[in-house]
Amino acid sequence: MEAAMTHDAPQFILLMGVSGAGKTTIGQALAQKKGSTFLDADDFHSKENREKMASGRPLTDADRMPWLERIHSHVTEQLKQGSSIILACSALKESYRDKLLENLSSASAVIWLDANKETLQKRIEQRPGHFMPASLLQSQCETLEAPKDALRVDTNQSIEQTIQFILKNIKQSNIQALS
């Protein structure tokens, strides 16, 4: 295992993508390797948002904005305290990513976890007890705005291959400060 991150400034990595892309699994493994704090944006959803999704209804921008504000506030506070953060969050639209990255230092990055639809569907169906039903995958795919400035990672491969790809390529992207 690699040593914990050593740096002067806090670091922030946003792992984004649709449900089933591997955000939580990859985020936890990457945080362990990098010595960072892992946060799952799902933990910040209101009871109402969870119930809405569990009933098969997609969230609206109005539903998501208070959620994004809670996440941003928490991340900002953690960074001020010197923590390095890896956040797993769908962040499907550019405006959502802009909100999450608002007023953060240049030592931040977006990594887009992407997989084919069959893999995504299979992963969602195999998750026990998650509030996000497979029926909402199509809605998420339709909502996704491909990020312009992100490291795109194919998560159809193994977790270890995905982590190694991220660690190798993170140095070659706009996020050198994270290495």
Image (cartoon, rainbow, N blue to C red):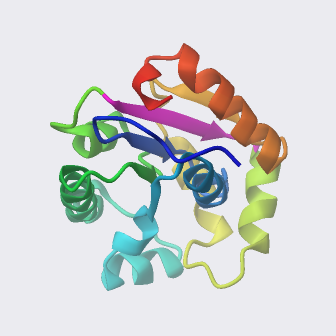
Foreground of the two, 28 or 117: 28
Q: Is any atom of residue 28 visible in this view?
A: yes
Q: Which residue corresponds to the image point at 56% horizontal and 72% vertical from the top-left? A: 132
Task: Give the dominant element type of the magenta stretch: helix, strand or loop.
Answer: strand
Horizontally, residue 76 falls left or right of residue 12, namely left
Q: Where is residue 111 in the image (x, y as percent from the top left)?
A: 52, 35
Q: Where is residue 104 in the image (x, y as percent from the top left)?
A: 21, 37
Foreground of the two, 62 or 45: 45
Horizontally, residue 76 falls left or right of residue 33, namely left
Q: Position of residue 19 (x, y in %)?
A: 60, 57
In this view, 117 is above or below 134: above
Q: Give the range drawn in magenta.
A: 107-116
Horizontally, residue 105 falls left or right of residue 147, namely left
Q: Where is residue 148 in the image (x, y as percent from the top left)?
A: 44, 20
In this view, 1 is above or below 28: above
Determine which quarter of the picture holds residue 96. Answer: top left
Foreground of the two, 48 or 72: 72
Instruction: Let me know if residue 156 is in the magenta part.
Output: no
Foreground of the two, 48 or 173: 173
Q: Which residue corresponds to the image point at 81% horizontal and 39% vertical from the top-left? A: 161
Instruction: Let me know if residue 115 is in the magenta part.
Output: yes
